Image (cartoon, helix red, strand yellow):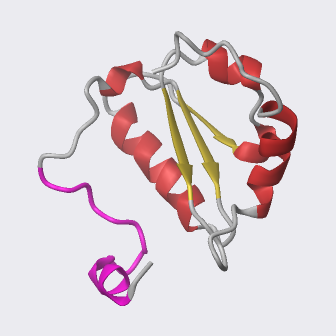
């Protein structure tokens, strides 16, 4: 995150949605998965669930180290949130998902 982005964040560190930004069908999201090193992406995942949950749909939030391909395939709609660390490396909690779940192609044709 550059200095401009840091300056524009509210005190709680969770950005407000951009004007005009929306998901095509927010009710289709049933899973939000996140990977974070410092906790900011986790906060964003739960804030997003709260905002999308206003539609009445139950939305599950999972850390990437709890995420499995079978759960992703059954989600219907998923929002994946992650950030990079250091020199662009993935967060530690994404390493297991990458090693275990991305070894071979997965049948995710119904995932949106």
Q: Is residue 85 part of the magenta span, yes or no?
A: no
Q: Quadrant of residue 13?
A: bottom left
Tell me which residue sits at (87%, 36%) in the image.
100
> Taking 21 as reference, is 31 left or right?
right
- Quadrant (top left/top right/bottom left/bottom right) for the C terminus: top left
Count of marks placed on residues: 0
**Can you say whether 92 is above or below 68 in the image?**
below
Q: Is residue 7 left or right of residue 84?
A: left
Q: Residue at x 36, y 89 (%)?
A: 3
Looking at the picture, how far across and down is residue 8, in whole percent?
A: 27, 80
Relative height, residue 38 to residue 70 (above, below): below
Q: Dominant secondary structure of the magenta stretch?
A: loop
Could you say where residue 51 lies in the image, as x and y percent from the top left?
Answer: 35, 43
Q: Residue at x 39, y 19 (%)?
A: 28
Q: Nearer the viewer, residue 83 or 103?
A: 103
Residue shown at the point (13%, 53%) measured from the top left: 19
The N terminus, quarter of image: bottom left
């Amino acid at each position: 995150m550059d200095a401009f982005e840091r300056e524009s964040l509210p005190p709680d560190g969770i950005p407000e949605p951009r004007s005009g930004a929306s998901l095509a069908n927010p009710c289709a999201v049933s899973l939000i998965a996140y990977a974070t090193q410092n906790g900011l992406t986790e906060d964003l995942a739960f804030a997003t669930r709260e905002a999308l949950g206003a539609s009445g749909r139950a939305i599950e939030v999972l850390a990437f180290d709890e995420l499995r391909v079978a759960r992703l395939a059954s989600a219907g709609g998923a929002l994946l949130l992650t950030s990079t660390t250091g020199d662009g490396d993935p967060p530690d909690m994404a390493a297991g998902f990458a090693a275990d779940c991305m070894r071979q192609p997965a049948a995710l044709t119904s995932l949106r």
